[in-house]
Image (cartoon, helix red, strand yellow):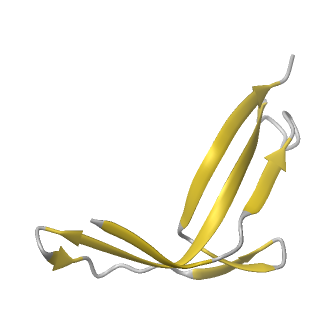
Amino acid sequence: SLTWFDIGEPLLIHSQPNQIPDRRYGVCTVLIPALGTRLVRNGVEASGRSWPREREGRPFSTSALAFSESWTEAT
C-alpha cells in the first residue's frame, strides 16, 4: 500500500512547447505535494522517504499527487 500524508496546497504547473530548448512539448498539470509518504509491501515498510523541496516559493517534496495532466505540442 502507498500512503501520502502531510498534504500541501495544490499547485498549477504550466509550460509552453519549446519553453525549454529542444523540448517540443508543453505540459499543464495540477500537483498536490505530499510532504510524507509510506510504502508497505507484504507487511514490510520501505526504508525510503520523501525529501523536502521548495517549488514556486512554497513547501514541496519529491512526492506529489498529479492530476489533470495535459501535454501540448508545438505546431
Please give the count of numbered marks on the rendered protein.
Answer: 0
Q: Residue at x 75, y 40 (%)?
A: 27
In the rendered image, residue 12, in percent from the top left (x then y), is placed at: 78, 56
Residue 64 against residue 6 in the figure, above or below: above
Q: Nearer the viewer, residue 68 or 72?
A: 68
Q: Is residue 55 above or below residue 30?
A: below
Could you tell whether 44 is left or right of 55 in the image? left
- On the rendered structure, is 46 left or right of 53? left
Q: Position of residue 72 (x, y in %)?
A: 77, 29
Which residue shows up at 53% across the image and 69% down it? Answer: 63
Along the line of sight, the residue nearer the viewer: 5 or 17: 5
Residue furthest top in the image: 75
Q: Quadrant of residue 75?
A: top right
What percent of the width, then of the height, locates residue 28?
76, 43
40 lies left or right of 63: left
Please report the residue visible at 53 percent of the width from the left and 81 percent of the height from the top.
51
The quadrant of the picture occupied by the N terminus is: bottom left
> Furthest residue to the left?
42
Question: Residue 5 appears at what percent x and percent y?
Answer: 48, 79
Frontmost residue, 31 versus 72: 31
